[in-house]
Image (spheres, rainbow, N blue to C red):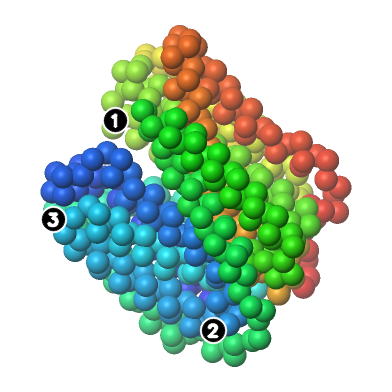
Amino acid sequence: MTYRARVETLYLLGFSLDLVNMFIGTVAYPAIAAELQASVPQLAWIGNGYMLGLTLVIPLGSWLAARLGERRVLCLSLALFTVGAVLAGTAPSIAWLIAWRLLQGLGGGLLIPVGQAMAYRECPPAERARLTARIMAVALLVPALSPTLGGLLVEWGSWRGVLLVSVPLAVLAFALAAAWVRPGAPVAVPALDRRGLLLGSVGLSALLVALGLLAAPGQRMLGAGLLVVATLVLALYARSARRTDHPVLQWSLLRHASLRLAMTVYLLVPGTFIGTQLVATLLLHGQGYGAAAIGGFMLPWAIASACAIATARHWLPRIGARPLLSAGMGCQAVGIVLLIAVQAQQPWLPVLAFALMGLGGSLCSSSAQTLAFQRLADAELLPGSALWNLNRQLSFCLAAAVLACVLAVLSSVTWDHAFALTLVLAAAMSLLPLLPLWRLPASALSLRTSP
């Protein structure tokens, strides 16, 4: 096996671990609530704690990789992840469970950007679309299969098995990282931007907590107040970053129009689908669809997503990103609008809507991921990966919180039209990246064919 194949395998294994831990736990919540006497907000923080850990440590990935070397950082992250998984799976209370999930996230947050940067650095630019296709295949299959696996583990044993199932894979990944990754020598790096790290961590933490509160009925005023605090702290962070020669996150990389556009697309297209899925679940439930039927609509989404990944892999090097991104945004927007007309007697309509959303969302995410790293020099891949993954984590909760709040406000003002207006807003959010997409020159969207 070539070194490139080893690095790619290791990254995909780490990426799978991250996705499993984001999507497998939901099915265990009822059992956790019964055994640990956990409330609904506490259950939500099982997932939020993991995401918070990821978000807090991602900015440190570049600095630590340069200071310690990539192999050491990967082994450290996998060790933290494994310890966190074992402790979470044996937690005696909900408070300890949330704390250990935070530790797991701290491990995973170091693993993903470092591994991703290594994988893209070892892959020639002309073949990065194929690498992206493999990454997106993992991103499709793992979330689709994880809930089923989690349900079986709960039924056959205990909810603790859901949290412990990733331990053998994490141990395997640790062994492979120690054996496969070349021991790079640490390099001299500037002093850590402690002020930026502190302000960024506090601001992002406040933002994530605020988004969680905004999505919870009865806590939206508190969430709005905390959102103001988060905005002020992040504004201070932005001011500090502009005055620092070596900020903890290299925002200067956004000078690359392709990276800037890709991050916008991911935030507003796949991110908006997460929020739309929540709204669609409530809408379909109100139309009389059961939980099994609603979950079943993700099957056409997954099939269409697989087709989109194959399409992007084949056509992106041939026709470029602009037509694929435009088609993807259009498909998702049409699919969202179709949900407005859903009736209990017309199950084919939500099937079509979810298929269009899967096709459109994956056309955009596949194209955006390739575009994000296509113009970066090798030395920029690691800090660029940190920016990309931080944006990816925020996309999972930002649009969902916005659409949940809009639906709640509209439901109290105009119940009959609340779902329709919220879905129209979601469709418009999916189309917003068209504006910067078509303003960019073709040269900014072209794919490199050589290093």
Q: Are marks 3 and 2 in contact (CB under 8 Å)?
A: no
Q: What residue sits 39% from the left and 78% below the top?
A: 174
Q: At x 52% / y 58%, what residue is drawn?
A: 201
Q: Position of residue 105 (x, y in %)?
A: 40, 61
- Compared to residue 271, the image places residue 312 above or below, namely below
- Residue 154 visible within the image: no
| Circle nearer the N terminus (3, 2) | 2
In primary-sequence order, the first of circles 2 and 1 is 2
Q: CA distance from mark 3 to mark 1?
A: 23 Å
Check disc 1 and give the amino acid type.
Answer: Ala
Query: Residue 270 location, x and y as percent?
Result: 55, 42
What residue did someone put label 2 on?
68
Q: CA distance from mark 2 to mark 1?
A: 48 Å
Closer to us: 194 or 25: 194
Question: For this view, does 48 lie left or right of residue 83?
Answer: right
Instruction: Say which quarter of the image contains residue 167.
Output: bottom left
Disc 3 marks a residue whose amino acid type is Gly
Image coords of residue 433 (percent x, y): 70, 38
Give the CA distance from mark 3 to mark 2: 40 Å
Q: Name the residue rendered at 63%, 56% in the picture.
A: 237
Which corner quadrant of the image does residue 84 belong to?
bottom left
Q: Which residue is mark 3?
A: 157
Determine which residue is flagged by label 1: 291
Image position of 444 (left or right of 111): right
Task: Identify the secondary structure beneath mark 2.
Answer: helix
Mark 2 crowd level (few <14, some 14–19, many ≥20, 10 Å Cα)? some
**Vertical side of 386 occupied by 136: above or below:** above
Residue at horizontal 36 percent and vertical 28 percent from the top: 218
Type of the residue with mark 2? Leu
Nearer to us of marks 2 and 1 is: 2
Which comes before the other along the chain, label 3 or label 1? 3
